[in-house]
Amino acid sequence: MESQLPDFSTTSNDGPGYKHSAAALRVRPPYGRRLAVRSRRRETIDALVFASPWFVGFLIFLLLPFARSLVYSFQSYDILNPPTWVGLANYVQLLHDPRFHTAVANTLFYTVIAVPLEIVVALLLAVLLSRRMVGRSLLTSIFFLPSVITGVAVTFIWKLMFQGDYGLINNILHYIGINGPAWLDNPASSKPALIVMRTWNVGMTMVIFIAAISGLPDELFEAARIDGAGAVRMFRSITLPLMTPAIFYALIINVNNALQLFTEVYALTGRPPLGAPGGPVDSTLVVVLYLYDSAFTFLTMGYASAEAWVLFLIILLITLVQFRAQKRWVHYE
Amino acid sequence: MSRRHAISLLARYFVLVVLAAIFILPFYWMLVTSLKPVNEVFLVPVRWVPKHFAWDNYVIALTNFPFFQYLKNTLLIVALNVTAAILVNPFIAFSFSLLRWRFREPVFLVVLSTIMLPPQVLIIPLFVIFRNLGWLNTYLPLTVPPFFGNAIFIFLLRQFMKKLPFDLLEASRMDGCNNYRLYWSVIFPLVRTPLAAIAVFQFLWSWNDFFMPLIYINDTSRKTLSLGLMDFLAQASSGGFVNWGALMAGAFLALIPCVAVFAFSQRYLATGISLLGVNR
């Protein structure tokens, strides 16, 4: 009797006559297949157990606060009394808040100048360190060290060096005949001081670029050298285009960090114990600094939440623009 | 070696050494200033080596503010954070790298996307949550969340685990090993190298963290080193005069563990970064 039923068995039969019996119509797969399904289910359960800390943390420390902060941004909340609903009032106020405008302008100014500068310096250092040479790892460490030792202590060193009259930097400039400004007390020079200090942190980006350069195929350079290309030409036509993915990655990370800058600004230009003012005439007031003030000094949590969301939207927008723009200039293999 | 080659090599070294000197300068300046008496800190022309060694800057730094208390507090927080990072992240990464389950890839995309979320959006609600839990002014807000994983570390470990030899895992599975035994006995020991990098990163990050302790800790006795240093500056400058020598001594003492960890871990950090950078 030829079977008119489809053959469900894959590895083995459960005995003669199975295919033709009513049992076959229940679509019960043979033993081997059931074992595979059972162990697949166990693997899924195990996988969920292993990932459970992340799931729980995601819900409690991320999703829940994320949703709540949106709600707070539409409320007026001073944490001592329950929040009251104010609708879009916080956002409208932000639109007219000159300090917030200053904060956003300062943050954007810093980002637009510091990030390309960092990338250029990191690129320069990475290229210089790309050949095998004596002392290469020592030099790499020297450049890398400042970028992993961030924070208050290190910022204080710069604060000292930037002191107006006799700080180290002005002292040295004096030798070259330049009269340095009162860096941290002068609104015109406070942001440049911040930028200079942060450029010291290029080490992390530099290391990423070094890794990228070391991944470039040698044959390209060999062929170019045979064709008589000089070092600069090789850099412009080979290294740079092939490094655009790494540059893009560095751009995203550094822009993100720049827009969220807080500790270094607080330590460099904050004047404790007055809280967290942003430097002379608010010249180094960055968004997160203003956010901190709004939330923890003035206890206007709703307003601060609105600020946080505006910052988030700015970051989102800039990141999206970068992702769109990458089609123009990033070469992927 | 051709002459042109030699010149370019020399030029390369020259630029690098000059830049390296500039990069080291702040550290040197911190060290030197910490040993200077008050009258030598701001001298014209620059005094590169102190004439008199003011060792009592260090005495001031250690006694005028509760340095050892701050050190103890910081060590506690850092130890807990590093432990959390080493234990939890490979556990989670195992699920996303070596186990096969239906929604693995989409969920992992969500994990990755959390890296891009700016923490400032979350701190206010988190603050309220912790306040309602009664956790304010304790170390709990600083030490508990790391036990739930860190997306960047999970990503790093997943990259690494995916490269582990497949047949080794299959052989263990075939031996009747369940996934938990597999993880603990086989996988966890194999990820020592990236875990070392993660431990170093977490150490450095937690040690220097200022923002989180600033928000959650109020008692002076519970402050961390970074908060303490800030207080030191506030204290010192309220009189209009800052004892930079003592401040630099404090900064130096606070930075020593970081530099030490960095120096000892050079190899591990390099591995960590290359895992981060190369696969983009």
Image (tube, coloured by chain):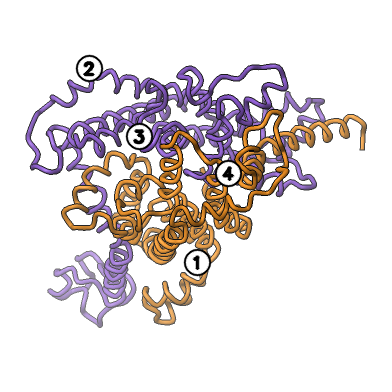
Chain identity of mark 3? A
Q: Which chain is purple?
A: A
Q: Which chain is orange?
A: B
Q: CA distance from mark 1 to mark 2?
A: 60 Å
Judging by the rendered image, the residue that carries numbered circle 3 is: A276
**Where is A193 relative to B73, above or below?**
above
Amino acid type indicated by mark 4: Gly
User: Crowding at label 3, few (<14), some or many (≥20) Cα neighbours within 10 Å?
Assistant: some
Q: Which mark is residue A96?
A: 2
Amino acid type indicated by mark 3: Ala
User: Crowding at label 1, few (<14), some or many (≥20) Cα neighbours within 10 Å?
Assistant: few
Q: CA distance from mark 2 to mark 3?
A: 22 Å
Find numbered disc 4 in the image and state the secondary structure of the residue it sits on: helix
Q: Is residue A174 left or right of residue B94?
A: right
Q: Residue at x 49, y 32 (%)?
A: A251
User: Crowding at label 4, few (<14), some or many (≥20) Cα neighbours within 10 Å?
Assistant: many
Chain identity of mark 1? B
Inspect this view and state whether residue A234 appears: yes
